[in-house]
Amino acid sequence: MSVSNPIPLIVALSLTLALIGCKEAPSGIEGDDALDCLDGLDNDDDGLTDCNDDDCEGAVSCLPSTGDDSGGDDTNGGGDTGRDCTRLTTALDHVTYNCDSLGYFFDAQLIGWGSAPELYILETASESPYSEIHPFPSTPFEYDPNGCSELYYLEIDTVDSFGEVVEGETTLFSCDQINGLSWLIYIFDTGRNAVECAGWGEDVAEMNDYLGGSCPTI
């Protein structure tokens, strides 16, 4: 896992790197979207959910386990990319971020399928720490229909006053403050169980103390 920052004016972070909202329920037939058959929702209001609904017959997530199908061992802890990738343990692959005059841009790549990550930011260089929380949008920006990966995207615009700060949308932190910030990211499986967290930045230990967490520094 890795986190990278291509900002030319900031010391590059070359690090090895991982709570809000389930997948929105689409309208129409259960199984109309690749994620419908594992989201725990009754998408077509017929009283049946996921693999219990005949509309999900043949969906990847409802296929019986046939073991490994392409030479690896992903049903037993390996990492090949076959039709049984839906059984991969959810984990953070990497995070990439950037910042410009408008704000911040984050890509969070998950291994397997999960739920939207959540990002915490703390101004750890200040004597009066100020923190923000920013959930990623609940719908993946991209995902592998075989269940091997998901990509979540978050854009946070920079604003000038506390009153303009909105979770998941705007931040009071500008690019010139980035060297005084610390970051934590949490990821969740499809059941909304926290499965991994990681931190990077100016002082992850202070970030953990402030939030009462124990996320490793990456």
Image: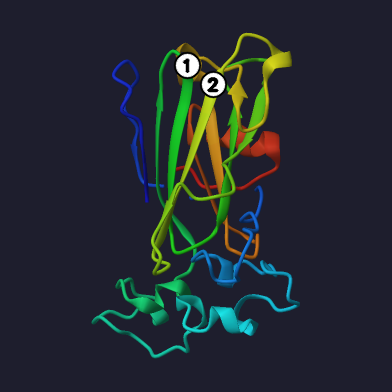
| Residue corresponding to mark 2 | 157
Residue type at numbered disc 2? Asp
Foreground pick, 201 / 115? 115
Would residue 184 appear left or right of 112 to someone viewing this image?
A: right
The residues tagged by marks 1 and 2 sit, at their Cα atoms, a distance apart of 5 Å
Name the image quarter holding the C terminus. Answer: top left
Count residues near mark 2 (Cα–Cα under 10 Å), then give few for <14, some for 14-19, many for 20+: many
Can you tell which quarter of the image residue 3 is in?
top left
Q: Residue drawn 35% across and 32% down?
A: 13
Marks 1 & 2, CB-CB < 8 Å contact: yes
Q: Residue drawn 66% across and 69% down?
A: 40
Q: Residue drawn 55% across and 50% down?
A: 139
Would residue 129 appear left or right of 14 to someone viewing this image?
A: right
Secondary structure at numbered mark 1: loop
Can you tell which quarter of the image residue 126 is in?
top right
- Give coordinates of residue 123: x percent, y percent: 59, 22
Vertically, is 117 above or below 11?
below
Count residues near mark 1 (Cα–Cα under 10 Å), then give few for <14, some for 14-19, many for 20+: some
- Give coordinates of residue 173: x percent, y percent: 56, 17
Vertically, is 93 above or below 55?
above
Vertically, is 13 above or below 36?
above
Residue type at numbered disc 1? Leu
Residue 43's disc number:
none
| Residue corresponding to mark 1 | 102
- Give coordinates of residue 125: x percent, y percent: 56, 18
Nearer the N terminus, badge 1 or badge 2?
Answer: 1
**Looking at the image, which residue sits at the far top?**
160
Can you tell which quarter of the image residue 161 is in?
top right
